[in-house]
Amino acid sequence: MFRAPPPLNLSTHPLTHLLPTHLSTEAFLTHQSLLRHCNCPITDSAVSASLFITAVSSAQRARIELRKRDIQVVSTVVDDKHNKDANQNHGGKDGDTDNDDGERKKNDDEREITVIKLSWLTDSIAAQSVLAKEPYMILRARARMGVRASTNAPAATLTPTPAPEKEEMERKRKEILRAAEEEGRSKKARWQGGKRRDGGGEEAVEDLVGITKGDGVVGRPGLRRKSTGEFEIEKMLEGREIPEWIRAKNRFSCCRSTPLHPPYPNSLFITHLKTILHSRLLSSSTTSARAYSTAIATLRAYPFPLTPTIIPHLPGCNGKLAALFNTWYTSSANPESRSIPAVDSLLDSPTFHALRLFDSIWGVGPATARKFVFEYKLTSLDELVTKHWNSLSRVQQIGVKFYDELLLPISRTEVEAVATTIRNVAVECCDLDPPGLEMRIVGGYRRGKPSCHDIDLLFSHRRHSSAAVVGGEFLIRLVKRLEDLELITHTLSLSYPGHHIGSLPELDTDAPAVSGDGNFDSLPRGLLIYRDPTTGVHRRVDIILTPPVAAGTALLGWTGGTTFQRDLRTWCKTRGWRFRCDGVWEEGGGRVVGTEGWGGGESWEEVERRVMERVGVGWREPGERCTE
């Protein structure tokens, strides 16, 4: 499938399994694609593998993950220094056993396994050489495959003992958690008392959602939010200054700074929430997904280490989320080893695995993914290709064809190189005042992400708004030229809402554009597959055009994270306006004064700043709009 040589050759490695624990869905699929690209013999069946790659950092946690996958460690291999250290971390001696009777039993399913850190892969790719595994080794052991894990094994927990001066805070924390747990048990009993599911259709979707409902961690808030004076919040923050958005109980993420990297270890907990959020999106639980995305945006913006007591007082959060945090926090003293059992069960679910596999295909959304899994009973891309290839749309076939390549991360350097190439071609295609044509790289790149999965390019012109310059005519001419240069191999779609491509009037800049599908973005847009002329790797590229009058709103609309953009639209709606990428509109249809395009010698960024200040959210650097 790849035309470019892989960065590493792992074809001689043993059968390998990538453990999903502590990885977001995006990260898991990205690293899985990296392994495939390096010709690594990867398997989805843990009991078939001999080499395990994981984001966990301790031997004890590795053993737990293996047991959950019916792999029982019989004895550790003693001739390796790193395994001796792993055994000490595990609290045992060389040659200890996971068997209840401590006996070493041999059968045909027993073999030697190795567990290494995920950083081995990333470091090897960075070094462009296959590095030795020993410095990255977590565990090497003899293991028996296909052994059901014991259900009565004690769980590793840590219950921190509060200091005397914090006894009151600890009492309140326990009160919150006790109420949440009682509500969770009642909901679990009600759910388990329902009719038996058969694993298909909507009932199977409900079962998927039910995995993380079992402990009362999702769904409607199980606690009434108690009013708390600012002096109590200050006590919870241990003297730190209360952020203004918490003091004002402002729930709009567009009105606060959300950094790219949340404080550690909050980021680890957020990763678990993102897994639950993804399950809600896959199961079409819209209300629950919105609640989780709101909570995640809030936690990403919170500048201090989280505590169960403070969470219910954060906008968009509640006691149920505090109980979920406490489950994670008390699971281990080491933040890297902490887990949520319900999330682990979700990651182990074959249904969830299949749904997110198909959902990650370009052109396949959650509804189609559910159809593949529940109606067609598919579990892999090979099955999709062999059984239902002809039923796929052209765009979906392209998404399957370039599946691994489109999941590979794109470095900032490569993004800039592709953008420069396309901009040069665009200038050649601009017949009217080429120096006035401007371009910005938007999306995740502009927010500061170290790598992206597609490239979003926004074009505008300072002085001209005709279709021949920033409309459909120019878009067609640009795409055609890129195809002639063999830089574009596939055009997924060309859209100019309200009009047919090929016969395009000038853009009406005095009225909001009408999008045929009701989408937020109503500007001329091309979704393309770009082929790197040097490496031959295919990349997803979006080219968006905006007239000068909408330059500021387009740059703003194509920069923020998903929740930031949703809250920005809601914020404007509360003021009687409608925000779109083509402008901020009054209810009557006219533009909101002060949000129109370039004025005088303004830069594009200065226009964007003026729009944000005019609508009342205040200026935020692109790197402060990272709500995901």
Image (cartoon, rainbow, N blue to C red):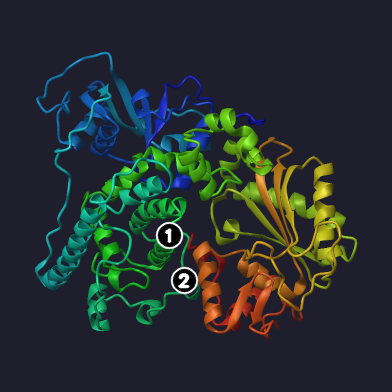
Q: Amino acid at mark 2?
A: Ser
With respect to residue 161, does 208 lie above or below?
A: above
Left or right position of 328 against 203: left
Query: Which of the 4 quarters of the picture holds residue 386?
Result: top right
The numbered mark at residue 412 is none
User: Which numbered disc, 2 or 1, marks the residue closer to the eye?
Assistant: 1
Q: Residue at x 32, y 51 (%)?
A: 210
Q: Nearer the viewer, residue 53 or 497?
A: 497
Kindly identify which residue carries mark 1: 289
Which residue sits furthest right?
431
x then y, percent, for residue 180? 21, 63
Q: Residue 275 versus residue 422: which sits nearer the camera?
A: 275
Quarter-of-image position of residue 330: bottom left
Mark 1 packing: few (<14 Cα in 10 Å), some, or many (20+)? many
Which residue corresponds to mark 2? 253
In the rendered image, residue 422, in percent from the top left (x then y), is placed at 76, 51
Could you say where residue 550 lies in the image, as x and y percent from the top left? 71, 73
